[in-house]
Image (tube, grey):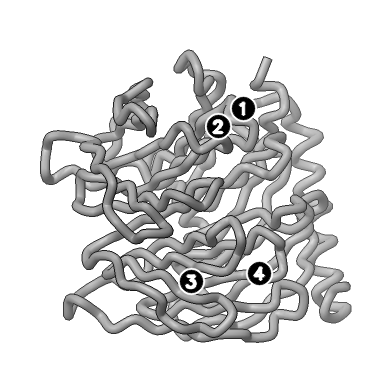
């Protein structure tokens, strides 16, 4: 249920406006099928779908966490989560918990009620460190990896710090089987950790240029492929077992590089959020064929596929979250 009548009215107005746009611009790659104002002003930094695909979570510069109906765009629930902007957000695999992060603090929330469950605070490694930039739940939901100034594994039941793997990490992602944790071990290197033994197994060099920064990583649903996206404007699809590059995709000529990468739940598509190019590109993950380019009309900060792969959400620096139809791109 929605919190109050004002939320219902606001949500319906947003949904109606979005549906009108969808009707007017149906079939045009320059327009989304649904557009949601997720913050009053400023930047939406992160988006995530609930595991059942019914809800879309957003976090941005206003410090709020918001949950929207992913079909209608109606606001379902919102709460003040952090004093500063929300930089990362993630649902637990069972959908019961929602994790958010700001500065050096992550919080675990009851995704249904918005009640705070745990507060996780890291000690900064560097005085001017940016703090936690990504969050990733293990497949069993019992561990949360936070990456930014440090790579830390947290016990989601107690809030206790289980392990600090490495300092100076900016992104991390659990493999679907929970055996492997990928994390940026240096600006241009992606490390593959044994998540059980907590040992570094292999490092993948995204680019020989040590000044290239890997901004985002994502596993395929079978865990065999890993996508890495960096400030060199390249996406590399890695064969995890062989440690070799299967495909290299060039997204755009960007001033600050790629901001986000995602692989569809069926493994057929790979998408990139192209920052100041204000576009999202979608490729065939097997052939590298460019399937579509969506024009967001804002600096793209984050992207996420819905669980059924039929929708791609994007967030931008103009307060908006947009939903794009990707159902016809797998043919």
Q: How far apart are marks 2 and 4 (CA)?
A: 24 Å
Mark 1 Cα-neighbour bin, 10 Å: few <14, some 14–19, many ≥20: some
- Are the residues tagged 1 and 2 within 8 Å (C-beta)? yes
Residue corresponding to mark 2: 294
Q: Is residue 216 visible?
A: yes
Q: Is residue 29 left or right of residue 203?
A: right
- Are the residues tagged 3 and 4 within 8 Å (C-beta)? no
Residue corresponding to mark 1: 29
Check disc 2 and report its element: helix, strand or loop. Answer: strand
Check disc 1 and report its element: helix, strand or loop. Answer: loop
Q: In this view, does 132 lie to the left or right of 12?
A: left
Residue corresponding to mark 3: 86
Give the percent coordinates (x, y) of residue 164: 31, 72
Mark 2 Cα-neighbour bin, 10 Å: few <14, some 14–19, many ≥20: some
**Earlier along the polypeptide chain: callout 2 or callout 4?**
4
Check disc 4 and report its element: helix, strand or loop. Answer: strand
**Earlier along the polypeptide chain: callout 3 or callout 4?**
4
| Residue depicted at x 17% and y 76% | 126
Indicate which label's residue lies in the foreground, 3 or 1: 3
**Earlier along the polypeptide chain: callout 2 or callout 3?**
3
Residue corresponding to mark 4: 66
Give the percent coordinates (x, y) of residue 245: 31, 25
* Relative vertical location of residue 102 with respect to residue 324 in this rendering, above or below: below
């Amino acid at each position: 249920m929605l919190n109050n009548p004002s939320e219902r009215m606001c949500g319906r107005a947003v949904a109606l406006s979005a549906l009108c746009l969808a009707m007017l611009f149906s079939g045009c790659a320059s327009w989304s099928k649904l557009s949601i104002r997720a913050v009053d002003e400023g930047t939406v930094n992160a988006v995530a779908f609930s595991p059942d695909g019914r809800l879309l979570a957003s976090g941005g510069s206003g410090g709020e966490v918001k949950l929207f109906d992913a079909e209608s765009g109606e606001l379902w629930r919102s709460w003040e989560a952090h004093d500063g902007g929300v930089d990362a957000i993630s649902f637990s695999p069972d959908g019961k918990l929602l994790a958010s992060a700001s500065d050096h603090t992550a919080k675990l929330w009851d995704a249904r009620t918005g009640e705070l469950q745990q507060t996780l605070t890291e000690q900064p490694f560097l005085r001017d460190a940016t703090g936690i930039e990504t969050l990733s739940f293990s497949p069993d939901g019992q561990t949360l990896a936070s990456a930014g100034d440090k790579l830390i594994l947290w016990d989601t039941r107690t809030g206790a710090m289980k392990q600090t793997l490495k300092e100076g990490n900016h992104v991390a992602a659990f493999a679907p089987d929970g055996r492997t944790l990928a994390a940026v071990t240096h600006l241009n290197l992606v490390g593959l950790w044994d998540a059980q033994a907590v040992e570094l197994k292999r490092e993948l060099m995204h680019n020989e240029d040590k000044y290239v920064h890997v901004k985002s990583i994502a596993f395929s649903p079978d865990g065999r492929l890993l996508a890495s996206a960096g400030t060199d404007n390249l996406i590399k699809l890695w064969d995890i077992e062989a440690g070799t590059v299967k495909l290299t995709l060039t997204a755009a000529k960007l001033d600050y590089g790629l901001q986000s990468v995602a692989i569809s739940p069926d493994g057929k598509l790979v998408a990139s959020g192209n920052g100041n190019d204000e576009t999202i590109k979608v490729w065939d993950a097997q052939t590298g064929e460019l399937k579509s380019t969506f024009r967001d009309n804002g600096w793209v900060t984050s992207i996420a596929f819905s669980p059924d792969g039929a929708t791609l959400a994007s967030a931008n620096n103009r307060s908006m979250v947009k939903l794009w139809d990707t159902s016809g791109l797998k043919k």
